């Protein structure tokens, strides 16, 4: 097995409330900030920046106030100057890029973890952009091994970092933690406990990596984005004319086979999956995706090989 | 068993979207309107007015736009004139009172059913205001007998009709159908099917009653409102400092005994129920009640006796 040396992860950022009604991240970041205030440097084995990403949306308990903040972090958007009349979230994206990035620069935080909730039954899902961002893949492997009370999966977007639109793409390494099912605007203790455990394990892995240990690679299961499916709609009004079928509801990451029911129309009929290939639905019936025209995403399942990793010995500038 | 004769129920109203992000009522009312347009008078055994109560909030997919519409139907509010600068929902409450009432008048619809969703695990819950509103109690008894795939319960508010603040209080008889759990802004097929079945059974009972049949009374189980419990809060910021405990979450209408866990604090401790009396929690972790300072309601369980009923023979005005 190949052994890669990678730079140490000195600076971590944990962000909550990028979507203001996804409550777990908001309350977890606040609780961590309280602990950091109390315990100071001893709270964690490395410095952690704790950020509430979208204060205005958090106050309103809405996903966003003017535009979806978590679609504002492409290199193109971040390199276009904003004005006082730009939407609040565009201006906030530039602020966050200055604070945590700039994206694709030496100054960016070493690792950024952005906390999200979904109404879909997705357990703990890591979202990563790049097939060779080994740090996030190793953290995923670690969580999958250590967390036994909830399924842990990886959704691999696989697009170039300059096109990546989410906050985590601002860090040198980064991933989203998507935990559900939880209604937006609601805080469930089970979901809070899962996210807290996942974060603590991520910090534990980073600390292990920084300590100089050789961390074994291996194979990990991943779900690669394939395409999105919209709800059936009335041709005149464009309103949805069906709900996710009860046999598909809550079955995120379970195989969808040709002939399986997908939608239950309000008029009574069932609409079935007609493609030849078995695919894996996820973000099934996510609240925020109604307005985006997405009933669920479909993924292909694959296995990724990741190398063993070890921290680079640093030139500490002594001479 | 006593036999009461009661006036026939000629005019029914079914309302959805009183809270604009409670999706089942919105889509069910729209589907019923589509069917009524197609089939005309034959669609149902009695005329049904189908109403989307809060079009502005439905469009925004929010509970309300300026104030909670379903707190605007007290006699005091409805008798106070509105102006152009009154909140949208106050003006809309007056419109709905003119359309479906006026409240406490001869012109009011005979029975009003208002459709709601909750994020709480409440199955099918009928909400009624009055211990002697026999029509709603009979419909509850009928649903409880006929629906086998989901628990059916009654939440009895028991306040005078002039103080009743909800839309259903505008009808001569009326109840809310509260179906969950469902995240607000999401439509689940299982919840849609439960609400559809409950409505069809209510219409079936009304039709049976109108036909002149003697409908047997008996005893029904009810949950009487006792009091509301707020989340523990930080004394300085007033922010919540705990989530509903995992052992209480989703346990609506299950007995809460002295010593049972109620809250899981973010700092780790458990807060337990300390009163002497066993009570029944419901609306546990309802999304919309965070802003009202309600973590859950507590009820006493009781048994209500309801008389047998029969429709009054009407003077048809022939001489």
Image (cartoon, coloured by chain):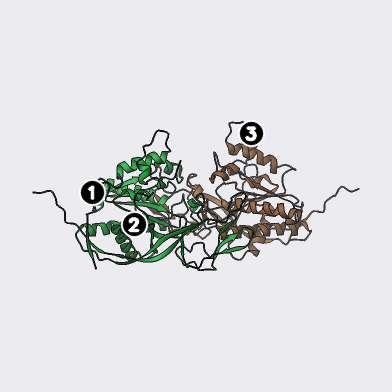
Chain colours: A green, B brown
| SS for dot 3 | loop
The residues bearing labels 1 and 3 have C-alpha atoms spaced at a distance of: 60 Å
Image mark count: 3
Establish if A204 lies above or below B26.
below
The numbered disc on residue B249 is none
Q: Is residue B248 in view?
A: no
Q: Position of residue A219 (x, y in %)?
A: 32, 67
- Identify the image quadrant of residue B56: top right
Q: Position of residue B275 (x, y in %)?
A: 46, 54
**Would you call the spot at circle 2 few (<14 residues within 10 Å), some (14-19), or many (20 or more)?**
many
Image marks 2 and 3: residues in contact by CB distance under 8 Å: no
Image marks 1 and 3: residues in contact by CB distance under 8 Å: no
Same chain for marks 2 and 1? yes
The numbered disc on residue A130 is 2
Q: Nearer the viewer, mark 2 or mark 3?
A: 2
Q: Nearer the viewer, mark 1 or mark 3?
A: 1
**Chain identity of mark 1:** A
| SS for dot 2 | loop
The residues bearing labels 2 and 3 have C-alpha atoms spaced at a distance of: 61 Å
**Chain identity of mark 3:** B
Q: Nearer the viewer, mark 2 or mark 1?
A: 2
Where does label 3 land, which residue?
Answer: B80
- Identify the image quadrant of residue A94: top left
Left or right, residue A309 beside residue B193: left
The residue located at (57%, 51%) in the rendering is: B23
| SS for dot 1 | helix
Left or right, residue A140 beside residue B319: left
Front residue of B14 and B35: B35
Where does label 1 land, which residue?
Answer: A41
Q: Position of residue B252 (x, y in %)?
A: 52, 58
The residues bearing labels 2 and 1 have C-alpha atoms spaced at a distance of: 32 Å
């Amino acid at each position: 097995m190949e052994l890669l040396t990678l730079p140490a992860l000195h600076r971590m950022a944990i962000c909550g409330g990028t979507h203001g009604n996804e409550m777990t991240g908001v309350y977890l970041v606040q609780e961590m900030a309280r602990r950091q205030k109390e315990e100071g440097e001893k709270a964690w084995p490395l410095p952690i920046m704790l950020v509430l990403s979208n204060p205005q949306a958090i106050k309103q308990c809405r996903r966003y106030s003017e535009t979806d903040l978590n679609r504002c972090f492409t290199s193109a958007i971040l390199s276009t100057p904003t004005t006082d009349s730009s939407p609040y979230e565009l201006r906030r994206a530039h602020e966050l890029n200055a604070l945590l990035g700039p994206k694709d620069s030496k100054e960016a935080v070493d690792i950024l973890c952005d906390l999200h909730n979904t109404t879909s039954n997705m357990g703990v899902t890591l979202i990563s952009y790049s097939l060779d961002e080994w740090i996030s893949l190793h953290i995923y492997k670690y969580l999958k091994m250590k967390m036994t009370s909830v399924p842990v999966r990886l959704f691999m977007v696989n697009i170039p970092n300059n096109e990546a639109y989410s906050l985590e793409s601002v860090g040198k390494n980064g991933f989203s933690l998507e935990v559900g099912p939880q209604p937006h605007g609601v805080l469930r203790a089970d979901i809070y406990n899962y996210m807290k455990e996942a974060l603590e394990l991520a910090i534990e892995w980073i600390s292990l990596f920084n300590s100089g240990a050789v961390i074994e690679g291996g194979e990990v299961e991943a779900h690669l984005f394939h395409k999105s499916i919209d709800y059936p709609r009335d041709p005149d009004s464009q309103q949805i004319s069906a709900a996710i079928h009860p046999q598909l509801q809550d079955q995120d990451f379970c195989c969808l086979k040709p002939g399986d029911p997908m939608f239950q129309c309000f008029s009574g009929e069932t609409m079935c999956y007609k493609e030849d290939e078995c695919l894996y639905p996820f973000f099934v019936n996510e609240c925020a995706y109604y307005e985006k025209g997405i009933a669920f995403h479909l993924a292909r399942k694959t296995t990724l090989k990741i190398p063993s990793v070890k921290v680079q010995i640093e030139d500490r500038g002594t001479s």
